[in-house]
Image (cartoon, grey):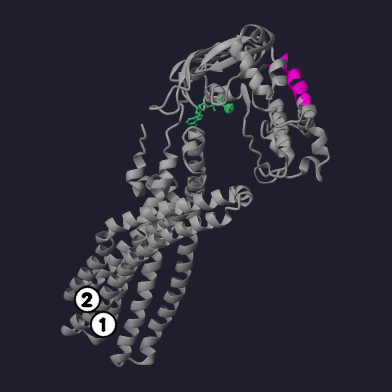
Amino acid sequence: MTTEPAADRPLRGLLPYLLESPRAFALVVASGIAFPALAITTATLGAWLVGSALAGDSAGDLAPGAVALCAAAALTGVAAWWQAYISHDWAFRVLAGLRVRLYDGLERAAPGRILGRRTGDLTASAMADVEKTEMFFAHTAGDYVGAVLVSLASLAVIAVLDVPTALVVLALMALVAVVPFVLAGRAGEQGRALRAELGGLNAEALDGVQGLRELTVFGRGGWYLDRLTARTRRTHRHAAAHARRAGAEQAVTDLLLSLGVVLLPLTAARGGLDVRWLPPLIVLGLASLGPIAAVSATARTLGEVRAAAARVLAIIGFPAHVADTGTRALDGTDAEVRFEDVRFRYDPAGPDVLAGASFTVRPGETVALVGRSGAGKTTCVNLLMRFWDAEGGRVLVGGRDVRTVPVAALRSAVTLVPQDVYLFNLSVRENIRLARPDATDEQVEAAARRAAAHDFVAALPEGYDTPCGERGARLSGGQRQRIAIARALLRETPVIVLDEAVSNLDAANERAVQRAVDEVRAHHTVITIAHRLSTIRAADRVVVLDGGRVAATGTHDELLARDAAYRELVAAQEGP
Ligand SMILES: Nc1ncnc2c1ncn2[C@@H]1O[C@H](COP(=O)(O)OP(=O)(O)OP(=O)(O)O)[C@@H](O)[C@H]1O
Ligand SMILES: [Mg+2]
């Protein structure tokens, strides 16, 4: 099931992104050729001038060469700038696209697949891992082509001048190029370990920041710091191992270059070559090793790049958690919700959470879904919203199996006010408008009024423009819930689901929200999950979940009269 095709060949998986804009890529490659070619030309020209001076040429003879050298040097500077500019500009554009697709992957898989993973780890993928692939785009793709072409061209020139020297250069090139590949296995392993470790560290740090209040309340700050320190040490060990290997590679490469410095003059001077050509030959030989050495230097980090790419591509390749293949239209008028013998479990090896649950919520009806904690109430909502799909039975909205309707259409017919509301660090207005981006300020305010939120919002320092703080931290729990209800009311969908939406409200506010819910009841189908007796009593009908099935349905009064288990449940809700 978990086909992550790109993940075992991560760099190959990045290739399509590379070729997405062939023109831009061609320019990057051109700049990757132009810069080293000009750099080598400059060095060789300089060496030729030295050789000519040694051979006794007059200043007048050298003048044209000197002018050419100045021009070549200037052009090299420009080429260096051009290459750095366009390769990075291009890389960051590709990276931006990669981030969008990463987010797409997350969204497709949400929330089913995401719940099992640590947020910090996912954040690391979204930020640091994508960043790491910049190395591949900016420093690998263009550079490699340039290095190979320019080095081979230099080699050809050397071969024309002196074949034995060319053979020595060829041998050195091969050795320099081969070093990273010999150590590639280790590099891959270390890169993977390091990236995973960094992801873990990130998750740990984020956990600590998010749980700061709990750590302070329980006085566990020191304990947490110890954990973080231990983790940091482990990351450090991995980073050090990585650095040791990279250092060894660098040393071997440097050694080979030094060997070239010794060998090339020896072979070049051996023949009866004109002394004018001797310095350029040596310089050309060494310079042509340069791009290969530079490429091998970037190859040292490829292990890490490959690991980062694998993590990014794995998320981009997340298969959709539910198959969005439905095509049937949902018309907004028939808003019946029906569960038919629904069976479901989260964990294939685990117990059934729903084991044949059946109930119907008629259009315009308000049904309270009740049951012990863990009975599967939120699970019913997860199936209705298609965050997961049922294993057996059917969930129907407006008489259509939810699997036969496009997910977007389904979600624009059903609005959920979730148990754990999330508010963005945006203004109150923008948070409400999330439900309907084209809503006017008046419509936003009207929704807030109906959700009994207008008064407290108006009293905030900047009214509707007040930022809600990180995760809505600047608002109270009850205020957050009312903002969430305002969102749902703004959306005006045929079905509204309130998952414990009024649990944080005091009695006065609950009545206000209840009035708001009553108001839309006539035109909407409402499922309200509640522990509060007042909410349950206000519903038209009650559906009691127990043991994965519907244990009883009826009005509150009927159930009280005939169902002992219900009486017990209600007594438990009411408390002592
Ligand atoms: N994402 C998940 N992965 C695995 N198991 C889950 C997941 N979500 C819920 N469960 C399990 O499924 C069961 C039903 O959970 P559910 O959230 O539907 O309960 P609930 O009736 O809404 O409870 P509460 O009143 O406490 O909100 C529980 O045993 C829970 O542990
Ligand atoms: Mg729940």
Q: Is residue 528 visible?
A: no
- Whether pointer 1 and pointer 2 mark residues with C-beta atoms closer than 8 Å, the reply is yes
Q: Earlier in the sequence, mark 1 or mark 2?
A: 2
* Kind of residue at badge 1: Trp
Quadrant for ligand 2 reads top right
Q: Nearer the viewer, residue 365 or 175?
A: 365
In the rendered structure, find residue 277 and report the number of the disc placed on it: 1
In the rendered structure, find residue 517 and report the number of the disc placed on it: none
Q: Quadrant of the N terminus?
A: top left
Q: Quadrant of the C terminus?
A: top right
Identify the residue at image location x=46%, y=35%.
Answer: 113
Q: Residue 534 location in percent, x, y?
A: 73, 20
* Label 1: how many Cα within 10 Å (few below 14, some 14–19, many 20+): many
* Kind of residue at badge 2: Leu
Q: Nearer the viewer, residue 276 or 241?
A: 241
Asked which secondary structure carries label 2, the reply is helix
Q: CA distance from mark 1 to mark 2?
A: 8 Å
Q: Residue 314 location in percent, x, y?
A: 41, 42
Boundaries of the magenta span: 511-524
Count the numbered circles shown: 2
Q: Is residue 314 visible?
A: yes
Task: Find residue 498 and report its image quarter.
Answer: top right
Q: Is residue 339 magenta?
A: no
Q: Nearer the viewer, residue 440 or 184?
A: 184
Asked which secondary structure carries label 1, the reply is helix
Residue beneath disc 2: 161
Identify the residue at image location x=50%, y=58%.
Answer: 226
Q: Residue 182 location in percent, x, y?
A: 24, 60
State left or right for residue 272 relative to residue 207. left
* Label 2: how many Cα within 10 Å (few below 14, some 14–19, many 20+): some
Task: Report the predominant secondary structure element of the magenta stretch.
Answer: helix
